[in-house]
Image (spheres, helix red, strand yellow):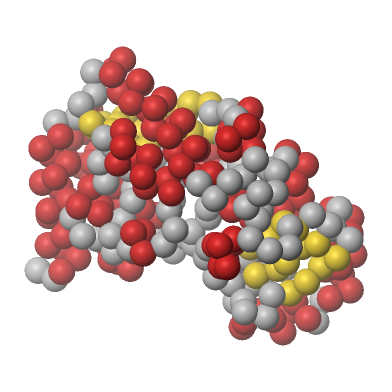
């Protein structure tokens, strides 16, 4: 038995000890593996819950529902009002804390109403190495992170997802669209729509990994360096499309795609 398999067995034991669980289910690679193992372990004692928000790319909710159905888990959708919250909308460095606290509070309430003993999320063993204010909210409210407790890394989660032939086995991380805004810059519905349209357009050109960082009238594109040639061959088309979307200026970040770039230099700088 390899290391991922040993950790998988430990994960099953951890979940079994909960007795019944509500899984915070985004439909990403982490929460999908978590839901799969929870469903295999506790069956009818599992409820998957997906939070709907304007900061999530359209289509993710339908995808989450399809995944939960394929796994055989009961699935519920709840609505959150991120853009109604001044604390979130103002986009402070602890924005994720504000968001997660609201979501987890709603999940805990639902779990209590349904008689479910434990709320669990898809935080993994690697997440502590990054700026993740949302992790603090989970710990404060008593949400457990079985993947992290079992020591499962992101790479091991991908390995096990392939073993289970999960549809997310090759899915790229897709954090909420609010991560495209520099801290202190207000998150608006219009800005979110611009980011989503821009990223979907670049994906249509064949770019798998992309972040369009929203700096007002300037779009800063992050893609893998291997895709630079593809984009440079279509500069006129890209600029024209971005102008249609609402960006006056379009820039390619020469550092390439990287998660958490808004946290560099404290996430501050030009808006």
Extreme residue toward the top, this view: 113
- Quarter of the image that includes the C terminus: bottom right
Q: Is residue 143 left or right of residue 85?
A: left
Q: Is residue 158 visible?
A: no
The percent coordinates of residue 232 (x first, y second) are 78, 81
Q: Is residue 121 visible?
A: yes
Q: Nearer the viewer, residue 205 or 212?
A: 212
Residue at 48% x, 59% y: name it.
173
> Up-down: is 178 above or below 117?
below
Residue at 63% x, 61% y: name it.
268
Q: Quadrant of residue 247?
A: bottom right
Q: Quadrant of residue 137?
A: top left
Q: Quadrant of residue 250?
A: bottom right
Residue at 65% x, 56% y: name it.
182
Q: How many marks?
A: 0
Residue at 49% x, 62% y: name it.
172
> Up-down: is 155 above or below 64?
below
Q: Nearer the viewer, residue 20 or 67?
A: 20
The percent coordinates of residue 55 (x first, y second) are 61, 42
Q: Is residue 102 left or right of residue 9?
A: right
The percent coordinates of residue 180 (x first, y second) are 64, 55
Q: Nearer the viewer, residue 139 or 19?
A: 139
């Amino acid at each position: 038995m390899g290391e991922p398999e040993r950790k998988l067995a430990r994960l099953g034991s951890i979940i079994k000890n909960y007795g019944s669980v509500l899984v915070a289910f985004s439909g990403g690679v982490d929460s999908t593996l978590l839901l799969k193992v929870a469903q295999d372990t506790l069956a009818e004692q599992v409820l998957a819950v997906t939070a709907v928000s304007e900061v999530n790319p359209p289509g993710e909710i339908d995808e989450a529902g399809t995944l939960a159905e394929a796994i055989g888990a009961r699935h519920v959708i709840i609505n959150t009002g991120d853009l109604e919250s001044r604390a979130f909308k103002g986009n402070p460095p602890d924005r994720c804390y504000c968001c997660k606290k609201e979501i987890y509070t709603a999940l805990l309430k639902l779990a209590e109403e349904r008689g479910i003993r434990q709320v669990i999320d898809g935080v993994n063993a690697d997440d502590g190495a990054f700026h993740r204010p949302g992790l603090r909210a989970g710990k404060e409210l008593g949400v457990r992170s079985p993947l992290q407790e079992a020591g499962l890394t992101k790479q091991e989660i991908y390995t096990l997802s392939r073993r289970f032939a999960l549809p997310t086995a090759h899915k790229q991380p897709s954090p909420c669209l609010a991560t495209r805004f520099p801290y202190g810059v207000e998150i608006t519905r219009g800005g979110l729509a611009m980011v989503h349209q821009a990223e979907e357009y670049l994906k249509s050109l064949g770019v798998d990994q992309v972040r369009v960082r929203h700096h007002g009238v300037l779009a800063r594109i992050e893609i893998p360096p291997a895709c630079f040639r593809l984009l440079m061959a279509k500069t006129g088309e890209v600029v024209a499309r971005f102008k249609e979307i609402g960006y006056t200026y379009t820039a390619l970040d020469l550092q390439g795609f990287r998660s958490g770039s808004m946290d560099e230099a404290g996430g501050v700088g030009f808006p």
